[in-house]
Amino acid sequence: MKVKAIRSEEKVTLSEVRKILAEVEAERLAAGKEMSYELRRSIEHANTLAKMPPEDSRVLVDELQKLEKMKPDIAFRIANIAPRTRDELRAVYAKEKFSLTGEELDRILELVASHL
């Protein structure tokens, strides 16, 4: 599949990708067009791994970005993975030059749990 042009570029969560792909799938089915292997696999991947509704994932990202030591990339990664334990959350921060305290980890986990 060749990319002809980039229409827009923005960060989205996996849940939002699932919603976008569902719209693309509906358009293709309505038009009677065949879906490529890559598109089918992308839809399957998004359906399997997305853990929350798109609206909740975006709200979670917005809330996470208000916290200290939170970069946009990490906020999106947390919303996509939806870690449930401190160890899973520490893995997200493994490459960062700083570490979080137990209280900071618990606050992030509480935010994630409130949106699942």
Image: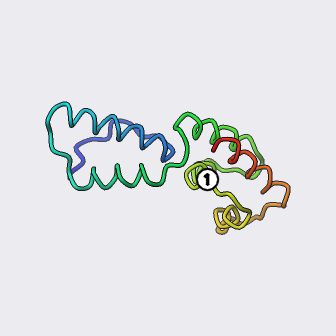
Q: Quadrant of residue 95?
A: bottom right
Give left or right: position of 53 versus 4: right
Residue 37 sits above or below residue 34 on the image? below
Residue lying at 73% horizontally and 40% vertically, measured from the top left: 66
Q: SS for tag 1?
A: loop
The x and y percentages for residue 35 are: 20, 46
Q: Mark 1 = which residue?
A: 82
Q: Amino acid at mark 1?
A: Ala
> In the image, is 79 to the left or to the right of 63?
left
Drawn side of residue 30 relative to residue 24, left or right = left
Of 31 and 66, nearer the camera is 31
The structure residue drawn at horizontal position 59% and vertical position 48%, both measured from the top left corner, is: 79
Image quadrant for the C terminus?
Answer: top right
Q: Is residue 88 above or below residue 104?
A: below
Up-down relation of residue 116 to residue 106 (above or below): above
Instruction: Give how far across and how far down residue 85 sits, in percent.
Output: 71, 61
